[in-house]
Image: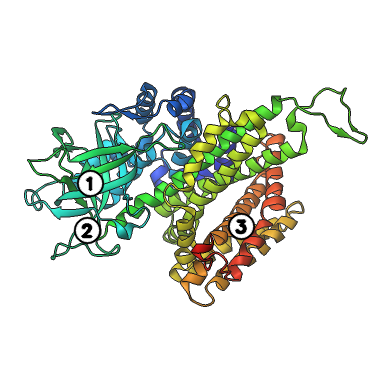
Amino acid sequence: MKLRSTLDFLLYQWLDAESLSQRERFADHSRETFDAVFDTCERIAREKYAPFNRLVDTQEPHFDGEKVILPQATHDAQKAYAASGMLSAAQDYDIGGMQLPYMVEAAANAFFAMASVSMGSSLLTSGNANLLMVHGTPMQKDVFAKNEFSGRFSGTMCLSEPQAGSSLSDITTRAVPDAAGFESDPLGPRYRLKGNKMWISSGEHELTDNIIHLVLAKIPGADGKLIPGTRDISLFIVPKKLVDTNGELTGVRNDVALAGLNHKLGWRGTTNTLLNFGEGKYPVDGEAGAVGYLVGQPHEGLRCMFHMMNEARIAIGMAATMLGMAGYHASLDYAKNRPQGRPVTGAGKDASAPQSRIIEHADVKRMLLAQKSYCEGALALELYCARLVDEQHTGTSQAADEARLLLEVLTPMAKSWPSEWCLEANSLAIQVHGGYGYTRDFPVEQYWRDNRLNMIHEGTHGIQAMDLLGRKVLMEGGRGFDLLAARITATAARASHVPELATHADALADALAQVTEATRAAWATGQPAEALANAVPYMQAFGHTVLAWIWLDVALAAPASSATQSIAENAGRMGAMRYFYHYELPKTAAWLQAVCNRDRTCADFPEESF
């Protein structure tokens, strides 16, 4: 089943994307305009991205002493993407946007992620600009965000530091007021930043006229010392090149220097950098220190940055999903055409019989079904979350508030579940190819390498799991968890009246009851160390329960789609749903046993015994 057909079913038959046209913001749109966007993106992805996926993997970015060199294909792809308008697809008309639903934007970007995720680094630019549209001043929006939406500038986010990693409370980059423009600069309160940032995607290149870094730094106290923890973290716009109030380059290079390129397992087509801020290599007005402009209020940097981080987490989940989908399609095609072995009959194998195609073997079908259930289920989850974003922004006050809470609970899984299980799909795609799978003659080894990074991008599994169990399911008295549970229960109730789905409805209700009990049991002593010791198994079980719910809800929509979807496609969805319930959902009981028992095997294991 091709991606476009899957998207059509999920968007139009399951999520009813066309109904969004009845809302004032999207009144100019219809299925025809949505499909036109998909046609354009599918064409650009096919022509500018897919043919060069292997090229950008083998011709990694390199520094010639002055600038970072990327293949011409990357420049061409970036220009085509910017020209398509997708950088500002969901933005208002009056700033050049198309006012598309975010769900449509997310679906359109799936084509690029599947064609070459390594070339498609636009997610940080869009997220950077979207953050500034919420937290920036009018001047910052005009000068920085709008130029990012047009593709003239690109954007990054700079959080991690070599000594701190994911522990943002330990960052040491400092920002001190710049006497020359602290109060008078129209671009915002002006500071000088000094520090080092690491793992900065697209941190240095020549693809755009300018790079706009969003940098977390601490403002020292009156005694000149940094306040421990996250209370003093602020957010700053630090452009690679200084600009005037019209967004024009002034010809002055900011004091931001490339310290090195990280050479990674995957995503090799995207530069990943170490950046030094304020080391004095490019002094501004004769003074060391990178010029930065405060975003929002002092000491509220994390609150602002999480606007971008949550968006990036959903985007990483979509990237992981589409890499899994690319591997699935490649291994499906291979399995249909590769002859090997013979069917087992009552008397064993007949060596004189013609060879079977490997797709005829039960175990290969198992591996293909696993991939299909992971990837199409993850795509449905990501689009459901995107639909919640639209509901949060354009729904009634009650619907918007419910969407906000549901997103809080689902975002950790929207990022982590695909990055674990669609990576497993990539591993199975290699297995289907046999020995050829780990050669570079076939694309599946690159898909696996590219996808392996997504388990770490935007927060590891451990971080996402602690966020889920330690904060999200408890926030506002557990109201978000209760809302999600109510939706899962409603789907199970509907499915219980469909004979083909009744046993699955019972299994889903049982899994939800187990997750609910495990949530209570984890916090029974009120001790965070005990509750969070098994946060990852909790998230794995919670994620599988959510995906089982998604699949059952999708299955309820499948019969109604027979007019536009083939019998084989609907049978494929039902088969993938059954696979998930028979092979995957039962795993939740084992994961939750450790959570309910508050098992201390890992937490108490002595370091010297490793």
Q: Which mark is residue 136?
A: none
Q: Residue furthest right?
A: 347
Q: Which mark is residue 237?
A: 1
Q: Please, what is the three-letter code of the amino acid marked with disc 2?
A: Gln
Quarter assignment of residue 342: top right
**Tags 2 and 3 touching, CB below 8 Å:** no
Q: Position of residue 599 (x, y in %)?
A: 58, 69
Q: Please, what is the three-letter code of the amino acid marked with disc 3?
A: Thr
Q: Say which of marks 1 and 2 sits in front.
A: 1
Q: Residues within 10 Å of mark 2 (few under 14, many from 20)?
A: few
How many discs appear? Answer: 3
**Residue at position x 63%, y 41% from top?**
371
Q: Which residue is mark 2?
A: 297
Please tell me which of labels 2 and 3 falls first in the chain. 2
Q: Residues within 10 Å of mark 1 (few under 14, many from 20)?
A: many
Q: What is the distance, in whole Å, between disc 2 and disc 3 at their CAs? A: 40 Å
Taking depth in this image into account, of 75 and 404 the one nearest to the observer is 75
Q: Please, what is the three-letter code of the amino acid marked with disc 1?
A: Ile
**Left or right of 341: which side holds 299?**
left
For label 2, the SS is loop
Q: Which residue is mark 3?
A: 545
Q: Position of residue 215 (x, y in %)?
A: 26, 49
Query: Taking 461 as reference, is 448 above or below it?
Result: above
**Left or right of 582: which side holds 60?**
left
For label 3, the SS is helix
Q: What is the distance, in whole Å, between disc 1 and disc 2 at their CAs? A: 13 Å
**Residue at position x 56%, y 46% from top?**
378
Please tell me which of labels 1 and 2 falls first in the chain. 1
Please tell me which of labels 1 and 3 falls first in the chain. 1
Name the quadrant of the N terminus. Answer: top right
Q: What is the distance, in whole Å, between disc 1 and disc 3 at their CAs? A: 40 Å
